[in-house]
Image: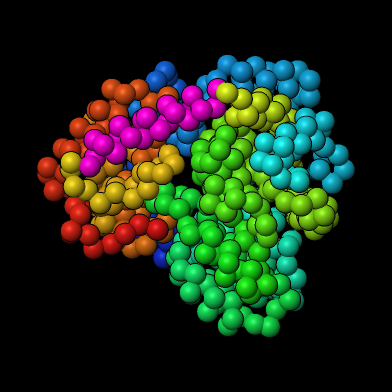
Amino acid sequence: MPDLLDQFATSLEGEVLVRHFEQYFRDYPDLHMKDMTLGAVGPDRKVNLNGRWVVNFGSDSFLGLDQDPRLKEAIRRGLERWGTHNGTSRAFSSVASCVEAERKLAAWLKVESTLIYPSVTLTNAGVLPALVTRHDAIVADQQAHHSVHEGLKLAHAGGAKTGVFAHDDPNDLERVLKALRPYRQAIVAVDGIFNMSGTLPPLAELRAVAEANDAILYVDDAHGTGILGEQGRGTVLDALGDYRNTLVVGSLSKGLSCFGGFVACPERLRLALKIRSGPLIFGGPVPPPYLDAVCAVIDILDSPEYPILRGRLSANMRQFLDGLRPLGLHVLGGVGAIVSVVVGDELATLRAGRELFDRGYFVQSIIFPAVPHHSGVLRVQINANHRPESIVGLVAAFAYLAANGCLLRIGNVKATAS
């Protein structure tokens, strides 16, 4: 009898993406900086990766709250109160801490209601296909998060019309929506802050086009939650001033340093999602102790302490950008907590990331398929609790790379990141 699992492995090894990465793993085993083991966490954002202590500039705990004693204590209390997990789908019950967390999230964001999922990926996979039928349409920015495009695929499989428009282009959005007619209603899905570049979309222009074409705006604000806007409420209120015809998806595990994702929406839509959203009905919920931590972190964000936390992040970002500016590099982002330094070539990107690692700094080396071919970037994630001396050291390491011709400079840019 043939080994069918072996046949599956052989077939998958022939796929382009698998071959692409296996080649890097095989040819550059010490260079690719993927699939590493985090062995320990120390103070001042130091971590032990693959046996080496480095300063971590790859963490999306932007406000540094993952080590906050109040969140740790909330999880300990939640563990004593609830145990390790809920034990049932939310279709049957939700622990009281989940109800409270959703209420506090809604009050903080100034929306009617919220609905919590175990992750932003599951939020997008659960909300987008649940919102539409075969009479409707969804279009997404070409560079929207991978999970948004996966949500589109699920919606398409359910019969909805789908399309993609050019990045940040309201005119192309209008073209795509008109091409998909007829439809009853539509959704325009974008990122609130694009995760690979740290740049903001033209939300006002996009919503105007959406409304003129019977569509609502759907903003995946995972990288803006807790970071941008008044009291960290995100990009939407900051850019639009209200939530008219707009749904917001946010993260509980990045700026908030907890666990999960959520959608902010009117109560009527929340009820419909609880009936139609597969990942919510058929999947497990956020572990209850983390919901107690969500309640604790919202109290912090909604307090006078928040501007102090955000001020530390802003100061660190200014220090880093000011340090990079004299180097003449092609830099993207910087409005939130993400800066991408464009390298271009895949192998050059990996080598640059490895050089930074060897100098004591972990930065994510981002290559295809996360960005287009030959558009590799070094993605730096600034945290509120990075030490000033660590930022000085990272800038010096970038200066070394620049001096040795390892990075693209302004005026010599051949590609940009997504």
Give the magenta part as a residue range: 305-325
Q: Nearer the viewer, residue 112 or 68?
A: 112
373 vs 230, left or right, is: left
Say which residue appears at 49% left-offset and 24% top-offset.
308
Q: Position of residue 64 (x, y in %)?
A: 49, 27
Residue in front for this viewpoint, 410 or 408: 410
Q: Which residue sits at x=48%, y=37%? A: 60
Q: Looking at the image, which residue sits at the far left?
A: 404
Left or right, residue 29 beside residue 122: left
Is 348 left or right of 160, judged from the image as shown?
A: left
Q: Quarter holding the C terminus?
A: bottom left
The structure residue drawn at horizontal position 75% and vertical position 71%, both measured from the top left corner, is 133
Majority SS type along the magenta span: helix
Place of residue 410 in the rendered image (x, y in percent of width and height, measured from the top left): 20, 54
Query: As drawn, is 98 to the left or to the right of 251?
Result: right
Residue 329, horizontal then vertical, whole percent: 22, 48
